[in-house]
Amino acid sequence: MSLPVSGDRFAAFRHRSYTRFFLARFFSAFAIQIISVAVGWQMYDETRNPLYLGLIGLFQFLPSLLLILVTGSVADRYNRRMIMAICMVVGAACSAALLGLTVTHSFAPWLVFAILIVFGIERAFMGPAVQSLGPNLVPEQDLPNAIAWNSSSWQTASIIGPVLGGLLYGVSATLAYSIAFVLLVIAAALVFMIPKPAQRSPASKVSWGEMLAGFHFIAKEKVVLGAISLDLFAVLLGGAVALMPIFARDVLELGPWGLGLLRAGPGFGAIAVAIWLAVHPIRHNAGIAMFIGVALFGVGTLIFGISTAPWLSIAALALMGAADMISVYVRETLIALWTPDELRGRVNAVNMVFVGASNELGEFRAGTMASIFGAVPAVVIGGAGTLAVAIIWSLGFPKLRRIDNLEAPERA
């Protein structure tokens, strides 16, 4: 029988291993945001080519897609904590490489793309390990609380990171990459300090069937399939992050600090909702809440696309972040609770590819459309598409729509 969801707002932090895990995720997310702002602005500053902004996302996504059968199986069979730590060390090395290109005045698009491919490989392995490690660090009744705080750590980094990243880049790109490097080193050290938790591994030997088990589970479990695919197509169409340098420079006429504020906009809304959910978890109508969140994300995208006022653009981005936080909270909790531990790595590998497709591939979609139609039409069309996805998926996945509470299903 499912255990009741804990009402303690700080329940997850009663577990020391989770606290270290939380801080490590926060520092690494903070570093990623700084790198993202610095690379995006530097690339557009050097090339003025919106297609290159889209390629930044594409080259980070491709490793997750190409390695999907490997990364999930590795996360299920090997020490998830060690995988996470090693990946953060590799991320720090990528930051150092970007720093080296900047210091030596060797910044060139294809050199940067090569580094981002390595960065993408690191994230491909780290994603399933991180998503699967979290549930091993807290008991089931504290998991929704942990997921809410996990999301808040990312969103807090999404607020502070882009603003600081823009300010640091305004001083010098060297300083931005240096800070990111230090944060990733600290994050790796924190993960190494987490004791190895209990982990259920597959009993069978490595085989094609074992590697494809994540796909088989998702295809069979319609709740998980609906939740993952909803996020994929909603953000794939509605993502506008890659085009923010264009909006900051050409549409809203802001500088690097303005780009930081725009990148932080979704975080302002998301962190408020994340903190609310940590204190007041969703107890009823979770499926409906998820679809409403996706629809509001589309509305926010439309407003951002047509806005020419900085305050309205930031408000629209805040709405997008708040709405997305609702969807993320429900989706990640459902995936964690409905997936057996011995399958979590492989299921989360598929999930991370879908998330990567929605984010990085969504950036490529936005950059390509912007190069053809212009930045504003690319965002407006995407927002309309997200609204359509919310309606279509609510009709196509009635079991997901009827999910009431966020508890693990009864298993035979």
Image (spheres, grey):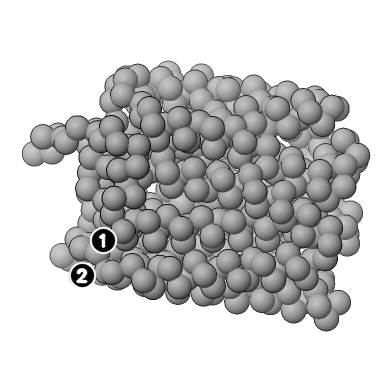
Between 261 and 57, the one nearer to me in the picture? 261
Residue toward you, 45 or 192: 192
Secondary structure beneath dot 1 equals helix
Between 171 and 2, which is closer to the camera in this rendering?
A: 171
Q: How many marks?
A: 2
Q: Is residue 400 left or right of residue 185?
A: left
Of 97 and 395, nearer the camera is 97
Residue 203: percent from the left, percent from the top? 15, 65
Left or right relative to 389: residue 98: right
Which residue position is annotated with label 2?
A: 205
Q: Are marks 2 and 1 in contact (CB under 8 Å)?
A: yes
The disc, 2 or 1, on the residue closer to the chain's N-terminal end is 2
Find the distance from the CA under tag 2 to the CA under tag 1: 8 Å
Task: Give the answer, above or below, for where 57 lies relative to 182.
Answer: above
Query: Which amino acid type corresponds to the residue marked 2 in the rendered image?
Result: Lys
Q: Residues within 10 Å of mark 2 (few under 14, many from 20)?
A: few
Q: Which mark is residue 386?
A: none
Seen at 33% across and 67% down, the residue is: 194
